Structure formats: structure tokens, C-alpha cells
Image: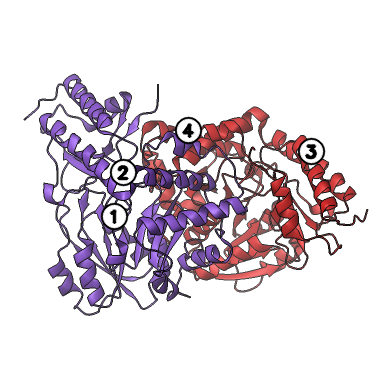
Chain colours: A red, B purple
Amino acid sequence: MSDPLLFTPGPLTTSAKVKAAMQRDVGSRDSEFIGIVAEIRSELLRIGGVSKEAGYEAVPMQGSGTFAIEAVLSSVIPPDGRLLVLANGAYGERIRQIAERLKIAVSINRWPEDESPNVVTVWRLLRQQPRPTHVAIVHLETTTGILNPIDEIGAVVREHGCRFIVDAMSSFGGVALDLAALPVDYLVSSANKCLEGVPGFSFVITRRGALQESAGWARSVSLDLLAQFEALESNGQFRFTPPTHALLAFAQALAELREEGGVPARAERFRRNREALLPGMRQLGFREYLKPECQSDIITSFRFPEDAAFEFAKFYRRLAERGFVIYPGKVSHADCFRIGTIGRLSVGDVNGLIAAIERVLTEMNVQRVS
Amino acid sequence: MSDPLLFTPGPLTTSAKVKAAMQRDVGSRDSEFIGIVAEIRSELLRIGGVSKEAGYEAVPMQGSGTFAIEAVLSSVIPPDGRLLVLANGAYGERIRQIAERLKIAVSINRWPEDESPNVVTVWRLLRQQPRPTHVAIVHLETTTGILNPIDEIGAVVREHGCRFIVDAMSSFGGVALDLAALPVDYLVSSANKCLEGVPGFSFVITRRGALQESAGWARSVSLDLLAQFEALESNGQFRFTPPTHALLAFAQALAELREEGGVPARAERFRRNREALLPGMRQLGFREYLKPECQSDIITSFRFPEDAAFEFAKFYRRLAERGFVIYPGKVSHADCFRIGTIGRLSVGDVNGLIAAIERVLTEMNVQRVS
């Protein structure tokens, strides 16, 4: 039996060619690999709509997305800096947790998980003493699937002279984003999300000037973003062993993004996936957690059915046995599960998932309220 | 043309089956993957000659070996702790650098790169005020290939009531090591060294009691060793996205280690590789940097020939073109290059390398002094 399809926020189902690209062993300090890393860094800037010439840099960092978030926080906030986190989910909370652990002065403003931070409140927060020097937000909160308005919030952040840190883990490459038009200083994302690579590293797209002002501030050696950048610039090499195979896979994944037609085409495929998912799920009696207007096409939270016959663990396991891996929920005040619509998945795969869910609900004797 | 053979300290040439194990996408929170991670953790303990029952734990950590070193230092040294680093190469210096960055009180005692820390000096250092609480050493300094005597030094460290941190990056799995008989509290190694997996994560083998005493000390969220352990214990999952493909590859690599006959058989293969390398290199006029008695079988530093016709960059490139990737040197006061004899390499491969070196020297008109 082939591997199940992954309807998750990542690691995802990747293409056969992406995985085939890992059938090699390359030297991490060898010229071929150095060339691949350079090409990946340029391509990431192109995907973000920016370039080296325009003053931007892409800096890959070993580890999961959280490692790159911590790399940014621990590297670019000065000792006397102050971070304001705008949070409406678990990943905003994680930014606060990391800043606290790093003994960075941090305040957090929370919105309900089904509501985006609003610009009027942010404007007010930015005028309170002590003034923040840095503001962080999650673009697409994987907790729920909500998409936050980083453009209008970013404008207010910039107006107040603060640096803007955006966790775009689950959006970059799958949601149209023109960094040249956005006041973002540090954007963080990961190889194994919308770009459809395999896990092993993440990356930061940053304004070179903002990065370079951070000399001497890094609180970690492994996660020192400026040192990582300077090493890559000086000899093209990572400071410490990179996940060579994951980078080979990523180069192939980026080639496939180009072939697909870039971010607009990929976003459109994800949109079609989700468009196929919603009516099917609604017909089976499921209701989304979020209001439609703030929902992304990347991942959707569904409330548990009210029928007591629904047990999530059993539901999950039976779907997995049928070849469909979904994702547990993370919403604080509602029982939900999540279905991702990213990765190498098509509308046909989504229809297969819905058919499997229908069969499993019948097996479990869950009543449908439709 | 097939990929070159990697005569490096890693990433290495791995087996075809190790790479083939990455031809799958598995969910990072799915039961099959959880089972694989649990099996890997148990197997790492077996390789170290210890077990959960005997009070040991294996904790994988995303990122390169340096990330796991920093995870240990930043997690297990209390705020009022003091680290003593016993250094005879660049990786000892890196431990000091990390501790300084983390604002941990640290002192370093340096030995020449071709000499091991000696136990009499260590005994004296441990009695100096302020007394260290933790002592760190590199087992096999990849800088040169020197193997340091962690058994006798560990005994003195233990006698003085200090915790002992061992960087066994380039030795674990390739050098016989019985952790049950060694006073090591934290041993750090990596997936892509003697265990012949692919890069993407590293791991710590630790006494559970020593790890658990560190509650509240972690200086990082990403690199929080105790939190990583507790998450793996509570639900079998990594806290943050693991490099799923690298872990699948590693499970296969560990199976191949068992098939080969465990660490003794692997150490013997590495010994034969190096035994084939030395006379060949000497015949071509190369001299080792280290005295034979402190040299490991893992990696060997060779001095540049005295002939001015020898240019390392050209030598390296021409060997790479012939399918053999060697490694630059890292010794401070001597011009050297390094040849690793680990990874899926045989005596036949070593002989192929020597033949290629001979041809390249001839092309470069380098005189042989034999």
C-alpha cells in the first residue's frame, strides 16, 4: 500500500521528483552544493517579489520553523529592545514564549482565535509607553487557518518606526505576497509548507540593512542569523552542517513551483482544493470554526460534530487506515480538527478524502446534521 | 556520472537503502512515525551500551551537531554554574564560544592540537577556585582526528563531583564506547557521522537524573533539551516539526549498523579503510599531522607537500572531478587537508582515492618526497 496522503499543515505529501532529488549524497562544502544553496537563496527572494539588488537577503537556518523564529528574535532585537506580539493563536503565543525565555522585554496583545488583530488597536498599542522597537505577528495562524492583514498592520508599524517581524510559516509560497510593497523587515517561513519541500530547515527573508544593524546582539551561536548570513556571503557555505538532502529536495520543489506557474497558480490550486473540501464537509454535517471572510485556503479548522458517537482518535485512525492523514485541532475554546489543503494534493485527492470521511462516519454511526 | 564518494567527516556517502528510505512522506504526528522515533531512541541507547532501565535517555534534536551541543550547554548548566572546557581543537573552542554567548561562566584550558588533554592537568584545574560544575571535552577532535581519553578524564571529573559533557560527534557508532562504564552525563552526536544517516538532526544521550535536574534552566525554547525529552515521553512526538525524511533514513542506517555487526564491526571497517589509506598516502609523499598513537581511524589530517607546485584548491577540484571529495584542513599552525574514512566506503574505495591522488599529483607536477 502506498503512503497515506497528508492533509496536514506539514510535513506534507511532496512530489515523487522532490523525494527522488534526495537520492544523492553531496558534500556540504563542495562547489556543486554551494551553487544549489545560492540558487535557492535567489529563488526565495524572487518568490517574495524582491531581490538582492533591492536590498533583501534570504538566509536559510537549520531546524524547524520555530528555530528560525527564535533565530530572528534572538538575533535582531537589541538588548534594550522591546517586542510587541500581536496574537490570535498558539503561534503568536510561541513568539511571546521564546522572547520571554530569551529575557527580551515583551508584551502581548491577544485577540480571539477567530478574529484578526485590528489596526486601530495596534495603532493605540504602538503609542503606549514603553514603546516597542519590534512588532511580531503571524501571517497565517496555523492554529485555526486565519489569515491576518499584515499589509495594513505593517503600515502602522512602519509609521511608528518599529521593525516588523512576520511569521509566514504557513503562507509563504501559497498566498500571494509582494514583499517589495510590504513594510516587513523579517519574514520567516519553512521548506516543508506551501513550497512543498521536505522538513529540515527554514529560512528568513530580510532587509539587509535591518539584519546588518544587529551586529553583536545575537544571544545564540547556532541561531545567530547575522553570522549565518555572513558565512553564506563569504564562501557560500553554511556555518554548521546543513541538511544537504532536504536542500536538494527544496531545489527541486522550487523548480516545480516555477513549472506550476509560480505562487498565483499554486494559490489557485490550494483555493480549488479548499473549494472542493467545504461543500463536501458541510454536506457531512461539519461546520468550520472560522467565519468565511477570514479563512485562508491553506488549512481549515472544523468543529467536532455534536453527536457523542464522534470520537476524534477513532475518526483519525480510521481515516489514516484508509490512506488519509488529517490533523488534530489546536483551538483553545472549541473542539476542532484541522484539514490542510496544501502539498502535492489535487481536487481528486480532496474528493477521495471526503468519500473516506463519509464511510468512516457511517462506520462510527455518527449522525449528520445537515 | 554517479555522485562522487565523500571522504569527509560528514555529510557522508550513505547506502542506497538509506537514501531509498526517504522516498516516503509520513505525518510527523502519525502513529507510524511516532513508533519509528521511539525505536530510534531505544536503539541509540543500545549502541551506547545503556538502556532506559539503567537510567539513560536518548533525545534527538533538530539541526546540526552544533545545535545539540548548544542545546546541552543552554539547558543543563544552572544560572550559577561554571563550565570548564578542555580543548585541543576548533570544536573545543566552539563549546567555549557557545558558553560565552550564552553568558555562562566558562574557562578553557588549551592543549596543542596534536596533544590530548592530560589527566594530571585536569585534576589540578578541577581544584582551582572558582570550581567548575560542568566539564566539557571533545571525544574525537574533527579538527585533526585526534582521539581524547574521555575514560580517565571522566573519572577525575566524576571524582570532583562535576557533570561531564562529551562531544562525541565524530566518534559515536564508529569507536567502541560503553557508556555504562563511563562517567558521562551528556554525550552528543549526530545522525550523519559514524552512524551513516543523512544530516538533519543530532542527539544527546543523557542520564535521566542529570537531565531532570535542569528544570527551569533552559535559555532557549527551540533548544530546550528537557522540554524536548518531556514532549517525546508524553506523546512520542517532537515539539516542533522534525526532519521526517532524515529520521526515516536514520532508522534504516541503524538497521544496517546491526546487520554489519554493530559498532565493533563498523569500527573494524573504518580501521581497515584507514590502514589502506596510510601506506598509500605515505608512498605518495604525504605525512600525517598527528603522531600515530593518538590518531583515530575516522579522519586523518595530512600536511601539504612542501613542493610549491601543490595548490590545495586545484588538488581538491581535480580529485572532485575524478569522483573523490576530500576535506579542507582546520589545524591552526600547519597547512593540512583531511581525509575521512567513514561512511559507506570500503578499502576498494580508498584504493580508488589513492590512485586518483597519484594521477592528480602527476598532472600537477608535484614532486614526491618518499
Q: Earlier in the sequence, mark 4 or mark 3?
A: 4
Q: For the residues labelled 1 and 3, say whether their Cβ atoms are less than 8 Å apart.
A: no
Q: Earlier in the sequence, mark 1 or mark 2?
A: 2
Q: Position of residue A66 (x, y in %)?
A: 55, 56
Task: Using the numbered discs, state the Cα–Cα distance from disc 1 to disc 2 in whole angstroms.
Answer: 13 Å
Q: Amino acid at mark 2?
A: Pro
Q: Amino acid at mark 4?
A: Gln
Q: Which residue is mark 4?
A: A23
Q: Quadrant of residue A111?
A: bottom right
Task: Using the numbered discs, state the Cα–Cα distance from disc 4 to disc 2 in whole angstroms.
Answer: 20 Å
Quadrant into which the N terminus of chain A falls: top right
Q: Which residue is mark 3?
A: A272
Q: Amino acid at mark 3?
A: Arg
Q: Which residue is mark 2?
A: B9
Element marked by disc 3: helix
Task: Read off the chain for label 2.
Answer: B
